[in-house]
């Protein structure tokens, strides 16, 4: 039997795996921190809301954060361009699915970057919605 939470997560991760040109730092996979420019992946679901009183269907929404981690020596315009290219892998209205669970991408936003130690981090927030 499929589980909507894991199906949504798997669908989002499968789409993130299509991003090329960067090392990826996946949640719970462990390993060493990549030396060069890379993407840190984090799935942040919101609270689920019942669709109605008579079924087990839930409205499920949340965010996938793809944080571009770069050396701080670049101009911010360069990292914002790269972050926009990463966001383009998740087009507004795009539907992803896993085990019959459908996930709709509702938008993406390149968030302001910030310095963290010797790295510059530019978060890309992908929002999604599902009824499952």
Image (tube, helix red, strand yellow):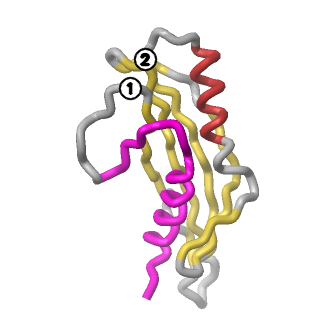
Report x, y in % for residue 109. Answer: 65, 37
Which image quarter: residue 80? top right
Above or below, 32 against 64 in this view is above
**Residue shown at 56% from the left, 69% from the top:** 49
Pointer 2 with pointer 1, Cβ within 8 A: yes
**Residue shown at 49% from the left, 72% from the top:** 7
Specify few, some or many for label 2: CA neighbours under 10 Å numbering under 14, 14-19, or 20 or more: some
Above or below, 76 against 108 in this view is above
Q: Nearer the viewer, residue 18 or 106?
A: 18
Specify few, some or many for label 1: CA neighbours under 10 Å numbering under 14, 14-19, or 20 or more: few
Which image quarter: residue 59? bottom right
Which range is magenta? Answer: 1-28
Q: Nearer the viewer, residue 17 or 105?
A: 17
Q: Which residue is mark 2?
A: 71
Is the N terminus in the top left, top right, bottom left or bottom right quadrant?
Answer: bottom left
| Secondary structure under the numbered disc 1 in the rendered image | loop
Above or below, 12 against 85 in this view is below
Report x, y in % for residue 119. Answer: 39, 19
Whichever of callouts 2 and 1 sits on the residue coming sooner in the sequence is 1
Label placed on residue 93? none
Label placed on residue 36? 1
**Residue shown at 52% from the left, 49% from the top:** 64
């Amino acid at each position: 039997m499929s589980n909507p939470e894991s199906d949504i997560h798997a669908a989002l991760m499968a789409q993130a795996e299509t991003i090329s040109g960067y090392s990826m730092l996946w949640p719970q996979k462990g390993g060493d921190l990549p030396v060069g420019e890379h993407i840190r992946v984090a799935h942040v679901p919101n609270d689920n809301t019942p669709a109605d009183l008579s079924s087990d269907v839930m409205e499920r929404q949340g965010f996938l954060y793809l944080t571009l981690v770069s050396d701080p020596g670049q101009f911010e315009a360069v990292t914002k361009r790269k972050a926009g290219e990463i966001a383009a892998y998740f087009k507004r209205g795009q539907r992803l699915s896993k085990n019959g669970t459908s996930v709709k991408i509702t938008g993406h936003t390149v968030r302001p970057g910030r310095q963290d130690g010797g790295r510059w981090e530019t978060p890309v927030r992908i929002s999604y919605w599902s009824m499952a």
